[in-house]
Structures are given as C-alpha cells and as structure tokens.
Image (cartoon, helix red, strand yellow):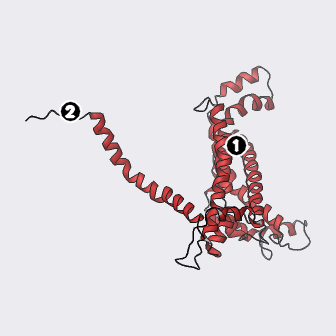
C-alpha cells in the first residue's frame, strides 16, 4: 500500500529551526528569571526560616499581612517612595539642563561630553566607597572643603542623623545616575533638525519659546522612557545604601530592598523577606504599567 504524504512546508521547517535556535535562550530565561520568581513567591507563602532547616509550614498570605502591620515596613515603604520620586525628578531635570548645555558648540565640547558620563561609568561599589570617604567624619573631603571655606567651624558627622543621611545618599545616587539622562536626552537633541530652530528665529521666537514649543515636545517621549527606567532603578536601589550607610542610622536609610535583604540574609526569615520583595515588585508594577499605557496612548499605540 502506498501512503499519501503531503510535502513539508518550507515555512514549517523554518519555524522549527527558529524554535531550535531560541531554545537555549528560553531555557536561560526560565532558569534565571521565571523559575526564581515562581519559587520566591512560593517561599513567601511559607514560614521559611533558615535557622529551622526542614521546617517550613505553609502559612498562606500571613507574611504579607504581617508586613502591612509592621511599622518598620511601612516606614521603609514611604522612604522608598520619597527616595525614588525626589531622585528621579531631580535627575531628569538636571539631565535635560546639562544636555542642553552640552548641545551648544564650545571649545573642548567632546572632552566635556566624555567626562559627563564618567560618574555613571564607575562601578556602583567604587561609587559607594568614594562617597563613604567623602562623608567620613574624620578625614572626609566634604568636611575638609567646608572647613577650609569657613562654612563650618568643626568637622561634622554627616551620616549621624537619619534624614540627613538619607538626603546625602540621595545626593550620591543623583550624582551617579544623572549622566544616563544626559546621554539619552543629548542623543535625542542631536536628532532634532536645525531647520526648526532657524525657522523659529526668523519668526522672532526667543530661547524660552524655542525650548517650549520645539525642544520640549520632541524630547518628551524620551523623557517618558527615561522616567520609567529610572523609577525602576530607584525603587530597587540597594548597593549604594548597603555600602554607604548599611540602612542606618536608626533605620533612616532603610528602603524596601534593604529591608528585604535584612530579613532574608541577616535574620534568615526567607519567607518574610520574599514577601517584602514582592511588595517591591508590586510597587514597580503599580508605577510602571499605568505609565507605559499612558505613554503608548499618547503615541497612538496598542492601547489607543
């Protein structure tokens, strides 16, 4: 008996090859991203304490309920919001201002542009150690500078008060992250046709009007993308706080990411620490998803 067989479609063969080529990447994504997310969420539903190996009873959402009634969690949550909003808004404003300056033609512009990206190019650990030295109460550069200028009469313990320590860590974060905004905004500015500015000058527009009606509308999409990226980075900020203050003094610089670290790896409460980490993920989603939808609608995209 002769069996009838349909010829294999070349598109089907191509699809199989594509799937085969993507398989290693899909395995890596699952192993490094999806599985840890699923497993950490499972851990958050357990009373998982590393001091009691082999004993991890299922407690449902108790870790989440406990977090919402924990004063330390609530203060860390508010501190995370404050840290993120202030640093991101400051970085974007400075990024736009510096990018506009670097767009101008002047001697040595290329060197200045290269130096502008240097703070972001430094590894986070190096950046944190540098700022810890600057703020040092005994031999820090900040104390030496202000003392020599006559602005202080004696060396100060800059990281000795909770709110002041928080603001100084925010300053260090702004110094490191602003160059990213400068680079992205500057790249957008370079793409704006010079003819638009020439036509506006002919029409009598001043500097502010050119910025308001030409520059700002054209860089607004990039500002939106930059805001989204930076708010995600700021909400999960950990390295700088760990190196400079270790969450102190008195918990004054303890944000959600550091609180999750403390509970998971210092107090060995992996279940509770995982629950805090998922609150952090939820915060990013609450901020990010509506913002993405708003940007997409403004650009006439999928959600229009």
Q: Position of residue 28 (x, y in %)?
A: 43, 56
Q: Residue furthest top?
A: 203
Q: Residue at x 69, y 67 (%)?
A: 259
The residue wearing badge 1 is 99
* Quadrant containing the N terminus in the rendered view: top left
Q: Residues within 10 Å of mark 1 (few under 14, many from 20)?
A: many
Q: Nearer the observer, disc 1 or disc 2?
A: 2
Q: Residue at x 63, y 40 (%)?
A: 292
The residue wearing badge 2 is 7
Q: Position of residue 143 (x, y in %)?
A: 82, 70
* Quadrant containing the C terminus in the rendered view: top right
- Disc 2, SS: loop
Residue 72 higher or lower than 284, as above or below? below
Q: Earlier in the sequence, mark 1 or mark 2?
A: 2
Residue 78, quarter of picture = bottom right
Residue 296, quarter of picture = top right
- Disc 1, SS: helix
Q: Position of residue 265 (x, y in %)?
A: 61, 73
Q: Position of residue 147 (x, y in %)?
A: 87, 69
């Amino acid at each position: 008996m002769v069996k009838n067989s349909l010829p294999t479609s070349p598109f089907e063969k191509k699809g199989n090859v594509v799937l085969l080529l993507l398989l290693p990447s899909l395995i890596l994504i699952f192993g490094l991203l999806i599985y840890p997310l699923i497993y950490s969420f499972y851990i958050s539903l357990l009373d998982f304490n590393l001091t009691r190996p082999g004993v991890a009873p299922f407690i449902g959402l108790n870790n989440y309920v406990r977090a919402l009634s924990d004063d330390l969690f609530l203060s860390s949550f508010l501190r995370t919001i404050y840290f993120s909003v202030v640093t991101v808004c400051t970085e974007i404003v400075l990024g736009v201002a510096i990018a506009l300056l670097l767009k101008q033609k002047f001697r040595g512009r290329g060197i200045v542009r290269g130096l502008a990206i240097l703070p972001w190019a430094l590894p986070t650990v190096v950046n944190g150690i540098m700022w810890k030295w600057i703020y040092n109460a005994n031999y820090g550069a900040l104390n030496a500078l202000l003392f020599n200028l006559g602005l202080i009469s004696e060396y100060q313990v800059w990281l000795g008060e909770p709110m002041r320590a928080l603001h100084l860590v925010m300053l260090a974060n702004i110094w490191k992250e602003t160059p990213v905004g400068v680079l992205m905004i500057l790249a957008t500015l370079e793409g704006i046709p010079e003819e638009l500015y020439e036509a506006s000058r002919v029409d009598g527009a001043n500097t502010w009007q050119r910025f308001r009606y030409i520059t700002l509308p054209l860089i607004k999409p990039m500002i939106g993308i930059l805001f989204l990226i930076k708010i995600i980075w700021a909400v999960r900020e950990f390295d700088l706080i760990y190196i400079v203050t270790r969450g102190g003094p008195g918990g004054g610089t303890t944000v959600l990411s550091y609180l999750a670290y403390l509970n998971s790896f210092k107090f060995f409460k992996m279940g509770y620490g995982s629950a805090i980490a998922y609150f952090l993920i939820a915060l990013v989603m609450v901020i990010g998803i509506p913002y993405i939808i708003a940007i997409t609608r403004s650009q006439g995209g999928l959600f229009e």
